[in-house]
Image (cartoon, grey):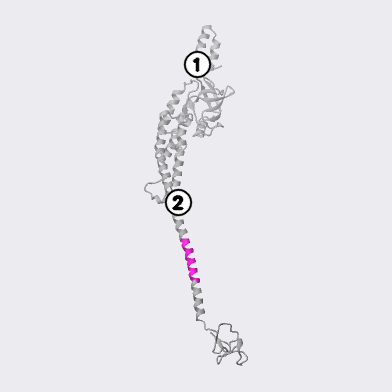
Amino acid sequence: MVLTGALVKAVVGLVAVAGVTTAVVVVASSDGPDEAIVTRVVDGDTIDVTVGGSEQRVRLLNIDTPESVDPDRPVECLAPEATAFLEELLPSGTPVRLEYDEVRTDRYDRTLAGVFTAAGALVNAEIARAGLASVVVFDDNVRFLPPVEEAQAQAEAAGVGLYSADVECTIPAQVAALEAVPAVVDPAEDARSIDFTVAAAEVTAFIDAADRLDHSITDAARPALAVFDQRDRERFTQRVEAVRAPARTQRSTLQTTASRKQEAERIEAARVAEEARQAEQARVEAEAAEAREAEERRRRTEERERDRAPAPRPSPPSGGGGGGGDGGSSSGGGSYPGYTGPRCYEPGGLVWHPC
């Protein structure tokens, strides 16, 4: 059974009245500090120690460092650094003093304690001072809360750890990086050199990144964000919106311009295609007309050549006599062997010659 501080006092009082001093010693030692030896650092806020020969897992009170060992969650920002910080502060074999608050164990049966070094430094506060932990309260245990809160305020003022704008994964750094992204389209740039579709896609990617960051800022359960109070988170959200709002306007403008440019390009391409089609049709028609004219010229040339050709000379009639009939002879004109054309007869009808 775990006894709270108030209950211990009540028990001590009752035992004192009853005169049973041995009971007082047992109960008082259960809430007193324990000397322990560090055997292993589990993560940024959990260590394994040996106390009186038995091993215990100790959860440092009033701090919560980024998660690094949960198999169901990704490693969070600065989680490895928090673990490394604690390993350097408490290497294996380091003697520590465990001091307790109202509730001694959590639901995982881990011992809840403030851990002090041999020099008297409160390790819980040192982790917060490095900016590697947020402040939390478990089961109303607030004994170590004031020094942890003071250490966290010092980390915030110094801008270290989770408060740093120079560590890429922190919320301040991510917001600053978002603010540093230049305009995708320079208004002074020649519009003819801009691919508006690509530019719109780039702005969309920027807006998506801003949306994801905005969602992260509202997830106060994450230690990387829990270091900031509600007002801080609202300021981060306002800074994100300050760059996201004009980006949305620019995306709308780019998309509209891209659509208009695409339509203009489509119309121009259709015009060029129609001109090319008409030019090709005109070429085909011209070639056809030229072919017809060439054929006509060839035909006329043949006709002229045929008209200019001399008539064939008639052959003299065979046999040399003055026969008649179709054998025919002509007086002084010779015969016309093989002639089958029209015949013109001399008076008397016996002599003919080609007409």
Q: Is residue 313 above or below residue 68?
A: below
> Which percent across, then down, holds residue 341?
56, 82
Q: Are marks 2 and 1 in contact (CB under 8 Å)?
A: no
The residue lying toward the viewer, choosing from 334 and 226, is: 334
The amino acid pointed to by label 1 is Gly
> Which percent across, then down, holds residue 101?
50, 20
The quadrant where residue 157 appears? top left
Q: Is residue 171 magenta?
A: no
Residue ranking furthest to the left: 188
> On the picture, is 177 further left or further right than 20?
left
Q: Which residues are magenta?
A: 279-295
Q: Secondary structure at mark 1?
A: helix
The residue lying toward the viewer, choosing from 167 and 49, is: 167
The residue indicated by pointer 1 is 5
What whole-number distance in Å separates the C-alpha atoms at marks 2 and 1?
Answer: 81 Å
Q: Residue at the location (50% across, 76% down)?
A: 303
- Label 2 vs 1, first from the N-terminus: 1
Q: Secondary structure at mark 2?
A: helix
The amino acid pointed to by label 2 is Arg
The residue lying toward the viewer, choosing from 157 and 266, is: 266
Residue ranking furthest to the right: 319
Is residue 4 visible in the rendered structure shown here?
yes
The residue indicated by pointer 2 is 266
Query: Which is the main secondary structure of the residues drawn in magenta?
Result: helix
Q: Is residue 283 magenta?
A: yes
